[in-house]
Image (cartoon, coloured by chain):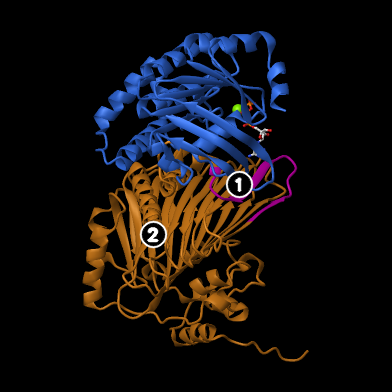
Amino acid sequence: MLEIRNLAVKLADEDKQIINGLSLTVKNGEVAAIMGPNGSGKSTLSYVVSGKEDYEVTGGDILIDGESVLEMDATERANNGLFLAFQYPIEIPGVATMTFLKAALNAQARARGEKELQTPEFMKRVREAAKKLGIDQDMLKRPLNVGFSGGEKKRMEILQMALLQPKLAILDETDSGLDIDALRIVADGVNALRAPDRAILVITHYQRLLDYIKPDTVHVMARGRIVKTGGPELALELEKHGYRDFVGEAA
Amino acid sequence: MGELKQVRTDAEAALIAAWDRAPAQADWRKAAFARFAMAGLPHRRIESWHYTDLRGLLRTALPTRAPDSAAVEGARARLAALRIGAATRLVVLDGAFRPDLSDMDALPEGVAVQSLAAALVADDIVSLLAPKGLGDDDSIVALNAAMMQDGVVVRIAPGAVVERNIALVTLMSGGAPHAAFVRSLVDVGAGARARIVEIADSPVAEIQSHDALVLRVGEGAELEHVAHVGYEGAGAMQLHSLLATLQRDATFNSFCLVADGGLVRRQIFAHLDGERATLGLRGLSLLRGREHADTTLVVDHALPYGVSREFYRHILDGEATGVYQGQVCVRQHAQKTDGAMKSQALVLAEGAAMYNKPELEIFADDVVCGHGATVGQLDEDQIFYLQARGLPRAEAEALLLEAFANEAIDFVTDETLRDIFAQEAREWLARRVAERRP
Ligand SMILES: Nc1ncnc2c1ncn2[C@@H]1O[C@H](COP(=O)(O)OP(=O)(O)OP(=O)(O)O)[C@@H](O)[C@H]1O
Ligand SMILES: [Mg+2]
């Protein structure tokens, strides 16, 4: 469960406020969606929750399963079950995708005091998950995300999510850049993760994704705060009328 | 004009006194000595040594020494433990070639080996041992010519295809600090193919190793050179000069790993002396503590259709200093030359420094030549991405550094050697992670 209380965030090395008094709760078993205009602070929110150090929390708190994470670094948060599917996945030259996946899975297993997976079992899991997501086996040998198409990068994020089985997943515009088939595959991946002990937060610009991933709640974010909360019908309304009405309310 | 009186440092005086005690030498060694005595040790006002002020860094010149029988036994044991893969080993111990430690009874077909001392009696050896125009004005190359004790002369017959690696192993024995002066020659006949592996090892931290390796790659021949330069230990110094001549259609690729080793100066003088010669000079330096490693290249394209590639990477930690100087000269006659030079460094600590000096001198008008040099830190976005997947920061950094190192090591074509180097890089990085763990 994710609880954000009256959060205020500025850039770490500049006096630029990006998030102003944002409150949001995503309960276990819930799928929530955030929609909002470009530059409203959605990605920033996802980074801050994940522990990126470019930002400074100047007020409020972030709690995961009732515990404040502000003192934890990104590694600790990930090992506590948080996963962020990046809007722009990072290219890592020279690190084979398979090597990276193994390092990530092993690091999380170690942090939780579990046994590391044996290589054959690991390979089997990756192959199966990759197949479901339509990821070519050859891609797993290539350096992570290097030269991957936009859609391939997004699938790779979902593959990681499927392997890491997080308790709290934030997907930042995972649907952008996906073709129609891929959109469905990615949505299936998210739906497969739906569980009573998991919380999922989906950031998107398009109602279409929400046809496949039926959200329980929809939040509208503008100028660094949540300005409206409703059910799935709110997404349909936004699709028709845009953000005009809400952007005003935020002021 | 008044008389010029030169001030000698202690090290210079000791080196000059050592020459006085040596037996009479051939004229060119006398001339080389005169050049050294005139110039002294290189210092920061000598442009090619600007970042490695040897005159200031080399406080004392250590004496040379002949090994006793215990030292020979010690060398034998260390030889067995060296990680160089399968190879025909030719061993120099404390400056002298040691057939008894070498694989003399298993020389591959087409490979002839003798000691430098034995080869020196022949008249025609000088033009081979001191190729004109290669390092002529470098006083350390001159010092090596004057002082060289011994070395290995390897001749590879024309057309011979040598499958087994030939390893030139330079060992120093233990005990009191000492120095050695070695010059070796590898002469690759026309159309021949071979791979030379070079490695140095010493059980004591304080040594001074003066090495020169002269290579002649004959017409259409192919030579790969894989070196591990640097003795372990903060008090070690290695000055290594590589003098390479490439004849028509020859291919020469050299890769050098510098890991550990107090003070390292590695200079390569390469002369593309025939049409369509192909040269590849590459390396990786992993430096920490107060280590100082300088790689200085002088590549001379004399004839048309030559290709040269230089690719060097540095990882610098602690208060280490890395130097890369790459000078590529394309002479007027060397049309259609294709040259590309790249130097990239990651500086991990505030106290570490990297000096990059790529230089192109182009006198021909129809050439494609370029260079790039970057000095930077690890990418924070990449580190965050890895941390967001659960990797501790130190591990994330190690993974990125290993990738950076491996992209250089991948130029080594021999799989065993590549794995050995990759393993060394991993160990170097693992020590770094261990040291930073609270
Ligand atoms: N590191 C940074 N440096 C400077 N400005 C930043 C930085 N991070 C975010 N911003 C600014 O903060 C604002 C919010 O950016 P953010 O990426 O969070 O928006 P977003 O809602 O995700 O937009 P989009 O829908 O286009 O993805 C923008 O004005 C952006 O330029
Ligand atoms: Mg965004």
Between B438 and B90, the one lying in front of the other is: B438
The answer to whether one can see residue B110 in this image is no
Q: Chain of mark 1?
A: B
Say what secondary structure mark 1 lies in.
strand
Instruction: Identify residue for label 2.
Output: B435
In this rendering, the answer to whether B33 lies above or below A59 is below
* Image coords of residue B370 (percent x, y): 66, 43
| Hue used for the chain lettered A | blue
Q: Which residue does the image show at 58% across and 62% down from the upper left? A: B132
- Residue B363: in magenta span: yes
Amino acid on which disc 1 is placed: Met
The chain letter corresponding to orange is B
- Residue B90: in magenta span: no
In this rendering, the answer to whether B94 lies above or below A109 is below
Between B343 and A58, the one lying in front of the other is: A58
Q: In the rendered structure, which segment of residues is drawn in magenta?
A: B357-380
Do circles 2 and 1 both sit on a common chain? yes
Instruction: Identify residue for label 1.
Output: B341
Q: Quadrant of ligand 1?
A: top right
Packing grade of label 2 (10 A; few <14, some 14-19, many >=20) is few
Amino acid on which disc 2 is placed: Glu
